[in-house]
Image: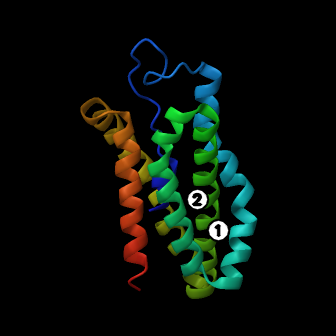
Amino acid sequence: MTALFYTNSTDLPSNGQGSCGFDWSRKQEGLFLGAAFYGNVASNIPGGLLAKRFGFHRVVGVTVLVASIFQLLTPIAAYWGFSLAIVCRVIIGTMQGAATSALYSCWSSWAPPLERSVLNSISFSGFPLGLAFISLCAGWISETLGWEAVFYITGVVLKFVEMRMNLY
């Protein structure tokens, strides 16, 4: 679920104007890719504290909702300006960091002490599996439907996950 926050959607074909028609330098492209990680680092501790106070379910639900909205807004923000695209990516990363901490809070509260490490390992193996899956699909999606579709599809998937979480 949370691996979708890390969608690396900028490995897309260039049309001679830079990335996907944007006149972005390599430095800007790197900043765009890293922006989600900057937000992630800043939100790990607050995410855990919020989960402890309000419950992991609420924190994960809200962070996935906000991340899905900003995932959907990222292509629009990129057309409006580089800075807005960076803001979207930082917010997505911030939500992912808080969700990760909240999930750790879940296992620390609900898992039997002798099973916590195994359950954490199983649940967090989704990060590399999700990254591998989206990396395989993103190139095909961007070639077929355009680079924006990668953000729209992953944003819709995140929204679907958030809606399923609210059923419980």
Gap between marks 2 and 1 measured at Cα = 9 Å
| Left/right of residue 4 with respect to residue 111 in the rendered view | left
Residue at screen point 66% across, 53% down: 40
Residue 43 image point, x, y percent: 71, 60
The correct choice, above or below, for 168 with respect to 98 in the image is below
Residue 112 visible in the snapshot: no
Q: Nearer the viewer, residue 52 or 160?
A: 160
Figure quadrant of residue 158: bottom left
The correct choice, above or below, for 16 with respect to 112 in the image is above
Figure quadrant of residue 137: top left
Residue at screen point 49% across, 17% down: 18
| Left/right of residue 134 with respect to residue 30 in the rendered view | left
* Label ID, residue 101: 1
Residue 100 visible in the snapshot: yes
Q: Nearer the viewer, residue 152 or 8?
A: 152
What residue would you read off at disc 2?
Answer: 96
Q: Nearer the viewer, mark 2 or mark 1?
A: 2
Residue 5 image point, x, y percent: 50, 53
Residue at screen point 56% across, 87% down: 110
Q: Secondary structure at mark 2?
A: helix
Quarter holding the N terminus is bottom left
Numbered label tally: 2
* Label ID, residue 119: none
**Mark nearer the N terminus (2 vs 1):** 2
The amino acid beneath tag 2 is Gln
Mark 1 surroundings: few (<14), some (14-19) or many (≥20) residues within 10 A: many
Q: Nearer the viewer, residue 123 or 33?
A: 33
Quarter holding the C terminus is bottom left
Q: Secondary structure at mark 1?
A: helix
